[in-house]
């Protein structure tokens, strides 16, 4: 309906341990660990700022995202953490026009849950009322972001297993 799925995202309450487990158990890596990451968002009509630790890695063209929310702000993640529901959180589609695709999702009966404007892009979480246990996401991709992702995919393809977690502190970004 919205094109190929480009990302699978999981929630964790210990991102560092999760990244190392993914590397050890599945060979996925290397992970880029985005620490101290904050995003302004509108969640269910309420303005909020979500603080996160995020780990990103690739297996082929599939992006694997690990998410740990580090504050109690309303967000598309908070209710999962409150219930102790770790694991699969959302599947994401890439878009070059997030407004158009959010409108298409609404017309198809999906509910828009959260919109996010971050330094690296715009995102929207949406939900099928028939499948409330998971979210879907639109990732608006600019040419620069796509170029960065392609670089990361190439790097993952050449990865020799060394330096499995690469830290990027996002404080002040």
Image (spheres, rainbow, N blue to C red):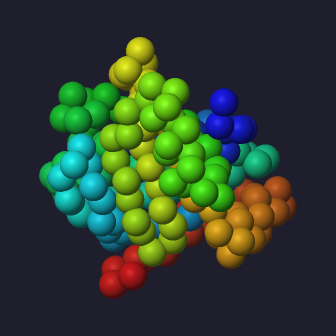
Would you identify the image quadrant in which residue 31 lies?
bottom right
Would you identify the image quadrant in which residue 16 lies?
bottom left
Can residue 152 be seen at all in this image of the molecule? no
Between residue 48 and residue 86, name the one nearer to us. Answer: 48
- Residue at 68% x, 51% y is 58
Task: Give percent across and percent down for residue 93.
Answer: 61, 44
- Residue at 33% x, 84% y is 172
Can residue 149 be seen at all in this image of the molecule? yes
Side of 34 relative to 41 (left or right): right
Would you identify the image quadrant in which residue 84 lies?
top left
Image quadrant for the C terminus? bottom left
Image quadrant for the N terminus? top right
Task: Give percent across and percent down for residue 79.
Answer: 23, 35
Side of 102 relative to 3 (left or right): left
In the picture as drawn, the residue positioned furthest to the bottom comes out as: 172
Q: How many labels does the image show?
A: 0
- Residue at 30% x, 59% y is 41
Between residue 162 and residue 83, name the one nearer to us. Answer: 83
The vertical placement of 2 against 117, above or below, is: above
Side of 173 relative to 158 (left or right): left
The vertical placement of 125 against 140, above or below, is: above
- Residue at 45% x, 35% y is 106
In the picture as drawn, the residue positioned furthest to the top comes out as: 130
Task: Give percent across and percent down for residue 36.
Answer: 33, 70
The vertical placement of 93 against 148, above or below, is: above
Task: Give percent across and percent down for residue 168.
Answer: 49, 75
Between residue 154 and residue 21, name the one nearer to us. Answer: 154
């Amino acid at each position: 309906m919205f094109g190929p799925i480009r990302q699978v995202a999981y929630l964790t309450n210990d991102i560092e341990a999760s990244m190392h487990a993914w590397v050890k158990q599945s060979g996925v890596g290397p992970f880029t660990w985005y620490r101290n990451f904050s995003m302004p968002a509108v969640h269910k009509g309420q303005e909020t700022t979500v603080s996160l630790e995020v780990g990103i890695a690739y297996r082929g063209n599939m992006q694997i995202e690990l998410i740990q929310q580090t504050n109690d702000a309303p967000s598309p993640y908070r209710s999962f953490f409150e219930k102790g529901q770790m694991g699969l959180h959302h599947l994401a589609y890439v878009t070059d026009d997030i407004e158009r695709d959010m409108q298409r999702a609404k017309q198809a009966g999906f509910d828009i849950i959260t919109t996010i404007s971050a330094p690296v892009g715009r995102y929207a979480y949406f939900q099928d009322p028939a499948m409330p246990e998971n979210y879907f996401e639109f990732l608006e991709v600019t040419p620069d972001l796509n170029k960065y992702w392609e670089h990361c995919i190439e790097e993952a393809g050449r990865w020799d297993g060394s330096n499995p977690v690469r830290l990027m502190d996002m404080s002040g970004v």
